Image: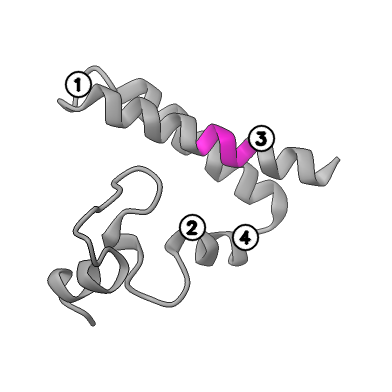
Amino acid sequence: MLSNQVSEEKFFPDGNNDPVNSPSHYNMLDVEAIDLIEMSMTRDDFLGYLEGNAMKYIIRYKHKGKPDQDISKAIWYLEKLKGKVKDGE
């Protein structure tokens, strides 16, 4: 497994880690973790996963010390959910 330093250099050579859209600790493989999770589930299961994660970040945004980041993560999951629902119509 790659060290965090190697991983961040590989995916963020300029040092700009994006903790919302593409956290470096989820990019240690050629496939992002979210894509592996989606491949392992049915469509309905994955939609529920996205919904649940959005709810998690909405529920905790006042309590973790980084409300802007948690709200941004909730929006990221909601946008992903919206795109998957739109694709499936």
First in sequence, mark 2 or 3: give its number.
2
Name the residue tied to disc 2.
Answer: 34
First in sequence, mark 3 or 4: give its number.
4
Q: CA distance from mark 3 to mark 4?
A: 17 Å
Residue 63's label in the rendered image is 1
Regarding mark 1 in the picture, which secondary structure is present there?
loop
Work out whether 64 lies above or below 88: above
Regarding mark 4 in the picture, which secondary structure is present there?
loop
Residues drawn in magenta? 77-81
Name the residue tied to disc 4.
Answer: 41
Q: Nearer the viewer, residue 10 or 36?
A: 10
Residue 72's label in the rendered image is none
Q: CA distance from mark 2 to mark 1?
A: 25 Å
Q: Residue 68 location in percent, x, y?
A: 28, 24
Q: CA distance from mark 2 to mark 4?
A: 11 Å
Mark 3: give few (<14), some (14-19) or many (20+) Cα within 10 Å. some
Q: What residue appears at the point 50 percent right and 38 percent down from the top-left corner?
A: 77
Residues under numbered marks 2 and 4 in contact, where contact means CB atoms less than 8 Å apart: no
Name the residue tied to disc 3.
Answer: 82
The amino acid beneath tag 2 is: Ile
Q: Quadrant of the C terminus?
A: top right
